[in-house]
Image: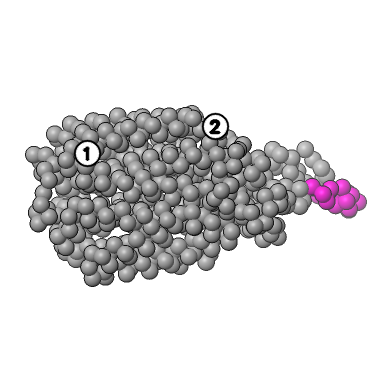
Amino acid sequence: MRRAKGYQDLDESGIAVRSLAPPMPPPQEIEMASVTVVPDDTFTVTQAVNALGFGWFQVKLSLCTGLCWMADSMEMTILSILSPALHCEWNISKYQQALTTTVVFMGMMLSSTFWGNISDRYGRKTALSMCGVLLFYYGLLSSIAPNFLWLLFLRGLVGFAIGCVPQSVTLYAEFLPTKQRAKCVVLLDCFWALGACLEVALALVVMPTLGVHWLLALSTIPLLMFALICPWLPESARFHVASGEADKALATLKQIAQDNGRPMLLGRLVCDDSVGIGQRGRLKHLLIPHLRNTSLLLWFIWMSCAFCYYGLVLMATELFESNPGGLEEACAADCRPLQTTDYMDLLWTTLAEFPGIFATIFIIEKFGRKRTMATQFIIFALCVCVLIYNSDRTFLTCILFLARGIIAGLFQAAYVYTPEVYPTALRATAVGACSGVARLGAMITPYVAQVLLKNSVAIATGVYALAAVLAAFACLALPIETKGREMRDTVTTAT
């Protein structure tokens, strides 16, 4: 549709944009063209982001948020290496090893809704900047902890800071065009997998010579890098619009247009105040009638995801550490550090996340979010049931490889679905709440993967299989399928 010479429509919604190569009309036509542009034409952030497309701006944001995910992954992966090392160095029991993991997830659970509230009230960039500094500071301090109690306290504070990391997905998703959003958010998990592989490789080099304290210290380097680049992160244009700051949102959109080499949209940016300033970031709004079923089901799905994912990570270490004859309970003084073969098997199972990511990209766009998550839960349940037959190390590695790829892709599918189903005013709070509930599952999983597994492999794997099957039914019960659905800005359009 042409509104005037020199302008043409580049967006399906009918928003006029300045042409890259406008025709050169006579002087009289130039004057008429400037008069015939309707000054009351409006556009939304969603229309602007879709029209400006995916370009250099999103590439830079991918690298920044990816670094945050990589640093988070390293802090999570180190948990499976830290417990056996402390067992040897400080002679701690299996319950204390489980507590080392649980305290991190407790900090994450307690802080997730706090960080979501901060993100919805003061901005995604503000929350992530605070997170980067605190995560590096407490991570570095934990490397010089003088005893077990100090280590527990400092790792709990690390978990408190990690609770903000999911907000990087909120920020990232709000800058992605509708068609590319699912693919890009899932691909973000490549940085998580890269961080996990880097941590295992670092442990393989550092642990035999320098020990676990140096490993904790060196693992904070990506955290320092992320803290340093936080001032250059862009603030979400959707957040500015929800805050009534259309001028700041417009400035951000112009920056996107400049970086992507696209023409800026004409007209006036719509600032929707239907939610109301000061009404953002309320946890109780996640349970309003329109969102209650979605929220409750997602909380259970996220809890099951974390329970299964971190359970598999911890089980891999326990299964590789165990004697070939079985999983006999060892006394506290019986120390068996992880060997080179153990680290290599951990590396192989961690690499499984990459094919899991690409498989999820393919099926999530073809079959939708709900069916993708449900199918992956069922396949994961079958994989963990096979772990009962733990007779051959190669067979064990292959099954763990498949299960790790499935559950990694599943977790990322949940990260795709959650920001899409909630409105802007509640999006960060919703992601934070889901992340917080997920940590409840992660807090429980060490006692299954590190304690119950020593007594009975069948019971431990059966618990994970049951949780996965129940979560699969929860996925199918979700009331909304978000495939091809634009991100909403108000509560009234959330359904």
Which label's residue is closer to the chain start, 2 or 1?
A: 1
Location of residue 112 (image quadrant): bottom left
Left or right of 82, for residue 72: right
Label 2 belongs to which residue?
479
Task: Identify the residue shown where x is 55% and y is 39%.
Answer: 292
Front in this rendered view, residue 54 or 27 = 54
Write down the quadrant of residue 240 in the picture: bottom right
Q: Label 2: few (<14), some or many (≥20) within 10 Å?
A: few
Q: Disc 1 on helix, strand or loop?
A: helix
Q: Residue furthest right?
A: 28
Q: Which residue is at a point 32% across and 69% down the rendered structure image? A: 141
Q: Quadrant of the C terminus?
A: top right
Q: CA distance from mark 2 to mark 1?
A: 37 Å
- The correct choice, above or below, for 319 with respect to 108 in the image is above
Amino acid residing under circle 2: Pro
Pair 2/1: label in front: 2
Please tell me which residue is depicted at 23% across the width and 70% down the height of the picture.
146
Query: Which range is magenta?
Result: 22-41
Give 70 or 239, whichever is nearer the viewer: 239
- Residue 21: x %, y % from top left: 72, 48
| Quadrant of the snapshot with the N terminus | top right
In the rendered structure, the answer to whether residue 116 lies left or right of residue 224 reads right
Whether residue 30 appears in magenta in the rendering, the answer is yes
